[in-house]
Image: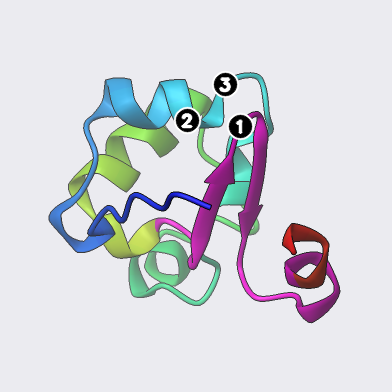
Amino acid sequence: MEVETVDLNKGLTVEELDQLIGKRDHLAFLNAKNEVFRERKMKENPPSREEALRLMSEYPNLVKRPLVVRGARIWFGFNAGEWEEMG
């Protein structure tokens, strides 16, 4: 399997994030353990898609990790069962 590694610490543009998330729920990509998430009380007051994309671009650690993309499938966060599916 060919693998391309992207350093998320360098951040993604709003456009790259928008393409990556596609029609999925943008809130699922937010790292609830991140300081910005907690400071802005995003659990109680979820950001709009546009705001979330802007914030994830500005604060790369706000993106849930690890993040693996294979074709149309995306796995993020660590869940042993889901990672076994990848093979």
For residue 71, which numbered disc appears in the image? Answer: 1
Residue at the disc numbered 2? 20
On whether residue 72 falls in the magenta region, the answer is yes
Residue contact between numbered discs 2 and 3, judged by CB atoms under 8 Å: yes
Asked if the residues shown at circle 2 and circle 1 are in contact, with their CB atoms under 8 angstroms apart, the answer is no
Residue found at x 73% / y 69%: 83
One can see residue 19 in this view? yes
The image quarter in which residue 52 lies: top left
Q: Is residue 61 left or right of residue 38?
A: left
Spatial CA span between label 1 and label 3? 13 Å
Residue, disc 3: 22
Which segment is the magenta one? Answer: 63-83
Mark yes or no: residue 30 visible: no
Q: Amino acid at mark 2?
A: Leu
Residue drawn at (25%, 41%), measured in percent from left and top?
57
Q: Is residue 1 magenta?
A: no
Q: Label 1, secondary structure: give it.
A: loop
Count neighbours of disc 2 (C-alpha within 10 A) and say few if under 14, some if 14 to 19, many if 20 or more. Answer: some
Residue density around tag 1, few if under 14, some if 14–19, many if 20 or more, within 10 Å: few
